Amino acid sequence: MSGTETRYLRFVALGDSHTEGVGDGDDVTGLRGWADRLAEHLARHSPQLQYANLAVRGRLAGQVHAEQLPAALALRPDFATVVAGVNDMLRPRFDPDEVAAHLEAMFAALTGQGARVATLTIPDIARVTPLARPLRPRLEALNHRVRAAAHRHGVVVADVTPYPVATDPRLWSQDRLHSSPLGHQRIAAALAHSLNLPDTDDSWTHPLPVLPVGRARFLRAASAEVRWVTGFLGPWIGRRTRGRSSGDGRVAKRPDLLPVGSSGQHFGRAFQRGPEPSVDRADASE
């Protein structure tokens, strides 16, 4: 299905690790992520597009507001994405009104300067990580406020929460906090479709193939639980108790507007149309 012929010249992405691209690549080979993938899609129809990614992992919504918004406004984007709040939601003291106020301030500033702005809702991570069930009220409260703030400022919302595929474990990385390459691709497709870009449709909502249920899959899932607690949850708790963040000492991977085809720091490989990243059926429950 073809969308509108809106063309953008300057795309700036603001946010935390999800926008930085954690889970899609690594710090050695480079992170790609949904924002890079979306920039590549935009560039197919706007070859002159320039793209900057100001996101830094571990940042709270207030930090994104204070540190990234001034830089974003200075770049004068005609299109921007703002996605933040998950890190706030994971902290002991969480105020959805305060977080939403930071997001709304960024919506207002960017749209007030003439940019088209898009954002995302947060999937029900309790379906991916059962230990996160106590966070469900926080997630619902934040999503409600984000939708309302976006409506007030004409911000496009890619609302992924109604679709079961958003919490399919195959769309999440092993740490269960970040998207896998397949998940990042689905997010980029969701935003592109919500923006009514050309060559987009609702295929991002479609479920993945159903996996057979059996003892082997159950044992892999149990093993994955143990690895997750020891490999990810434990270190995360350790950083929190020491008052540290995964983003300490880090800077934006792509702070300047550059052509999408250029070799910006950590920028992903050239966009290629084709099938989604393959899913390892044997490890799909992990």
Image: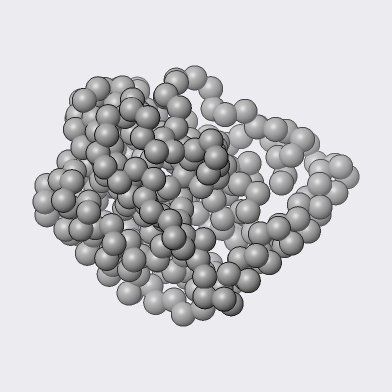
Which residue is depicted at the point 26% across and 42% down? 256
- Residue 129 placed where, x, y %? 64, 59
- Residue 278 placed where, x, y %? 62, 28
Q: Image quadrant of residue 192?
A: top left
Which residue is depicted at the point 22% across and 54% down? 71
* Quarter the N terminus occupies: top left
- Residue 114 placed where, x, y %? 11, 47
In the displayed image of the protein, which residue is found farthest to the bottom?
A: 93
Nearer the observer, 254 or 6: 254
Which residue is depicted at the point 65% across and 65% down? 235
Q: Image quadrant of residue 285?
A: top right
In the displayed image of the protein, which residue is found farthest to the right?
A: 215
Relative height, residue 118 to residue 239 (above, below)? above
- In the rendered structure, the answer to whether residue 26 lies left or right of residue 260 reads right
Which residue is depicted at the point 11% across and 51% down? 113
- The total number of labels drawn is 0
- Residue 99 placed where, x, y %? 35, 70
Quick check: can you spot residue 22?
yes
- In the rendered structure, the answer to whether residue 162 lies left or right of residue 7 reads right
Look at the image and name its color scheme: one colour
- In the rendered structure, the answer to whether residue 192 lies left or right of residue 172 reads left
Relative height, residue 62 to residue 3 (above, below)? below
Quick check: can you spot residue 164?
no
Nearer the observer, 7 or 151: 7
